[in-house]
Amino acid sequence: MTTYTAASVTDRRSTKVMITAVFTALALATNYALIGIPNIKIMDTLVFLAALFFGLRLGIGVAVSVWLVYGFVNPNGVDTFLMLSFLMVGECFYALAGVALKKSFVIRDVVKGTKEYQRLSIIFGLVGLLSTFAYDALTNFGSWIFRTGSLYQDFVFGNIIGVPFSIAHEASNVIFFATVAPAIIVAATRLGLRTPLDVA
């Protein structure tokens, strides 16, 4: 009789495809549910959590998969291939943030049950703010690229005009990262769910 450890199960290709599909479906479902509220999405938090729990490749897989669907099937309009490439790269920032935080002392303390929830929320909120700021800077630039005489002007104009949307995006992500993300991690730890976090 063959037995599988948790690590070997999550390393299997079929399991990774299933996890990517689940996170992608959750992100798309919440995106469409919030379609009437511009730039307020739980998707970024889900990409972050996917990478935090299961690694960079899976997190990037979720980020790209979501935009391949949402970029083309969107009631607000279809994105160009150029803009879609900026959106995909920007979304990968959340996966990078998840992996970076996974390797930090913060997650090790959560797994051991020694991190206070309030402090955890503050740290996650800051991570959400920084990664969203980077995402907005890149995608605002992408929305204006080649519209002026120089890339520098494209960057400046894109980010000035995008300020209202950026503020809403960054504020909402601070809230989602500070509440949803740590709650899911703490719940998974307390339920004894074995994930790669346990050996982070």
Image (cartoon, rainbow, N blue to C red):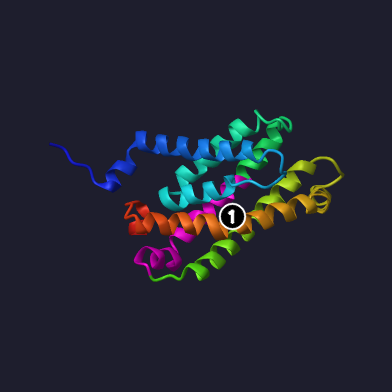
Q: Nearer the viewer, residue 57 or 47?
A: 47
How many marks the image carries: the answer is: 1
Residue 131 appearing in the image: no
**Image quadrant for the N terminus?**
top left
Judge left or right: residue 59 versus residue 148.
left
Where is mark 1, residue-wise?
176
Judge left or right: residue 193 versus residue 117.
left
**Is residue 143 depicted above or below 68 in this figure?**
below
Residue 163: image x %, image y %? Answer: 79, 54
Residue 78 appearing in the image: yes
Judge left or right: residue 25 versus residue 41.
left
Give the residue type that dot 1 points to: Phe
**Image quadrant for the C terminus?**
bottom left
Q: What residue span does the magenta drawing correspond to?
A: 90-113
Residue projecting furthest to the left: 1
**Is residue 185 depicted above or below 122 in this figure?**
above
Q: Nearer the viewer, residue 82 or 160?
A: 160
At mark 1, the secondary structure is: helix
Q: Is residue 106 a member of the stretch shown in magenta?
A: yes
Magenta portion: prevailing SS class? helix
Q: Where is residue 122, by image quadrant? A: bottom right
